[in-house]
Image (tube, rainbow, N blue to C red):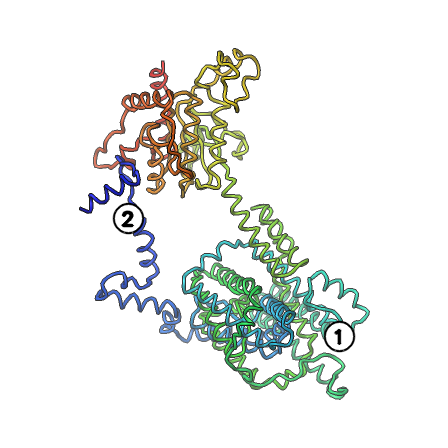
Amino acid sequence: MAERIKNFAKRAVDHPDNTVPIISSTAWTHGVFNNPVRKVGHFQCFSERLSDQNCAIQIQDYLISLFPIATWITRYNVGWLSGDLIAGLTVGMVVVPQGMSYAVIATLPAEYGLYSSFVGVLIYCFFATSKDVSIGPVAVMSLTVSQVIKHVEASHPGEWSRPQIATVLALITGFIVLGIGLLRLGWIVEFIPAPAVSGFMTGSAISIAAGQMPGLMGITGFDTRAATYKVIINTLKGLPRTKLDAAWGLTGLVGLYAIRYFCLWGEKRYPRKARVFFFISVLRNAFVIIVLTLAAWLYCRNRAVNGKYPIRILLTVPAGFKHVQQPNPDPKLLAAMAPELPVATIILLLEHIAISKSFGRLNGYKINPNQELIAIGVTNTVGSCLGAYPATGSFSRSALKSKSGVRTPLAGVVTAIVVVVALYGLTDAFFWIPNAGLSAIIIHAVADLVASPSQASSPLHIVSPLEFIIWLAAVVVTLFSSIENGIYTSIAASLVLLLLRVAKPRGTFLGKAHVRIAGNDESKSSSREVFLPLSKTGITNFEIEVLPPSPGVLVYRFEESYLYPNCSILNSVLVDYVKENMQRGRDMTNVKLSDRPWNDPGPRGTAAEDEIENRKKPILHAIVLDFSTVSHIDTTAIQALIDARHEIEKWADHPVEFHFATVMSPWIKRALVAGGFGIGHSSSRIPQEIAAVVPYHDRESPSEFDQRRDIESTEDIKKSPSPSPSTHGFANVISSDTPFFHIDLAGAVAAAESGVGRFASFSS
């Protein structure tokens, strides 16, 4: 009964009766629904019997995968502890001044930077798949937070406090990123290439440095969150208004670079003392802040006038977690910040994934992008309850953590302890920290994010000049517009480039060449036949002689998947090449101009001369298509290939064999068979439209050429030698039902060339 219903449904939809074995739709269904479940472990037991003993194991494995700490904490040892202590203390000494500095960028009180630092390093430890990454406040995210606050205050002035806006932003963005991680959608980050990230980071770093220059010099009177070029111009105009703050700011900046370069020199001059110089360099932020704070205290303690000091200092920093409260996601506030949420979310996940992948690659381990997104999401969601603003991976602190010899993510707990000690025991000293000193620390930190000219131009220009343009566009737009527009520009340009590469693929006509393969000695050298582009632009060694295949045979290689954006271009190239280089089958000498098709330009000279030139060209027998780089094909592409076959056969006025090399995917074979390819003849009996956009029911009967082509195709396949069956226990890779599918290009060309003589005798 089921078989009858199935056959009736096939007749109802005019389903073709396949005589060639192809992969079934059931296999595709199993591949979509079963494999991802089995691969990820997402409760496969719900799709099977609940009594299955593997159900509990799969649930347990899934829960453990959410907490990677469970896989290594039981093996923790004293050797790991020493490395984690050193790395945790080192990062803690850096994150305290940096956290307060970045809070200033975000236009928040300094303590909020410490809250974010504490939550980031503590919670990330439990969800991390990277031992090196340090989560906390970063410069780019802090600048983004300031832009969100500016946007909300512009439309709703005074309605919400800045910390409230920042914590709600952390809650929402964290929840979004957490959802992306739980749904295993981390692959979307792969659509943003490294040049786009590098360009955006470079432009953002320059913007941050420019925004901190007025604070470094004590210059006020303009908006430091405006477009970067405006900030630079206003800073230059304000140089005559430089205040005493510059003494602390410039001194701190010079001191930071002096210690850094002294330590680099010391590491080279005294390699045995390299570890000592490294830790001296690490402590330069803390050392400079201590010196500047002491100097500010000595100078300002007796010079207060009406509560104001001669230089700008940090003033009161509340001890402990004074601002712990539940975030209040007011719907009106969410609506106000909605336009800024996409860019904040993108920066949150993009910067962290880029940093974690980079350090995983450098230190020989692999991170799980989805799990990293879960870590970021949980960190910010929980952090919003502790007064934290959005935090993500920090490049400078992660590099420091890696160089310090970190062994496990547990080093984050040590860093969190350092932050807590600072929050409860050092806030009185924070009162005298000069703001210009914090600006010096920020400028010094973000300078490392700026790509040098050699890093930006040389590799990108050599590998892909178009990607260098994307990098440059991201930098320029960020500097002359905003961070938001800069990241949107880089992402949009990258996606456009990706689409152009798919829609404008390169394809080449191939010929044969004999190349010598050198062995260990001359006696062991050998030669082989390879297929190379006939065009010299596709060959780097111009001494190689590439010969075309036998007359009447064309070999064409696709260089992209065969899909709807590019199929018309590839088919146009194929048809145009055939019309230009292959003989037209029909003699047009006695055909009147009025009888020619409207789109036929006619002969350039006389009809007789045109026919003489036409007869000099080879008669087209077969086209070999190399599908070695084709991983996907769709309905539009199959239809375009059918159209190309029909147009080529009308031009040649006889059936043309289409051979396919290296078609390994069963889905591509299935699609080609549905279009009448691979089965041994051109088969005009298959409809000219495999998937009509607009069904045309009053189709004309087959033309005289189509009827003759059916007869010739049938006779031709009868005369074609069928592939030999398997012998000596070896199975044929290609089915005998599809003799025009070939395992490699050499076999496809040999099969096409073997039929040239037979085709010539048959035609005569």
* Residue 247 numbered mark, or none: 1
Q: What residue type is labelled 2?
A: Thr
Along the line of sight, the residue nearer the viewer: 416 or 755 = 755
Q: What element carries label 1?
A: helix
Q: Please give the name of the residue rendered at 40% of the width and 32% of the height, measured from the top-left corner.
A: 642
Mark 2 sits on what residue? 26
Q: In this view, does 75 lie above or below 294?
A: above
Q: Which amino acid does label 1 sit on?
A: Ala
Residue 287 placement (x, y as % from top left): 64, 77
Q: Furthest-right residue in view? A: 240
Q: Is residue 737 left or right of residue 602?
A: left
The tag earlier along the polypeptide, 2 or 1, is 2
Q: How many numbered discs sit on the rendered protein?
A: 2
Residue 676 placement (x, y as % from top left): 34, 32
Q: Please give the name of the residue rendered at 60% of the width and 49% of the height, measured from the top-left corner.
A: 468
Q: Please give the name of the residue rendered at 54% of the width and 83% of the height, measured from the top-left corner.
A: 321
Residue 354 visible in this rendered orientation of the protein:
yes
Badge 1 crowding class, 10 Å Cα cut-off, few under 14, some 14 to 19, many 20 or more, is: some
Q: What element carries label 2?
A: helix
Q: In this view, does 563 lie to the left or right of 429?
A: left
Q: In this view, does 371 lie above or below 595?
A: below
Q: Distance between the residues labelled 2 and 1?
A: 75 Å
Along the line of sight, the residue nearer the viewer: 322 or 273 = 322
Q: Look at the image and tell me in which quarter the C terminus lies.
A: top left
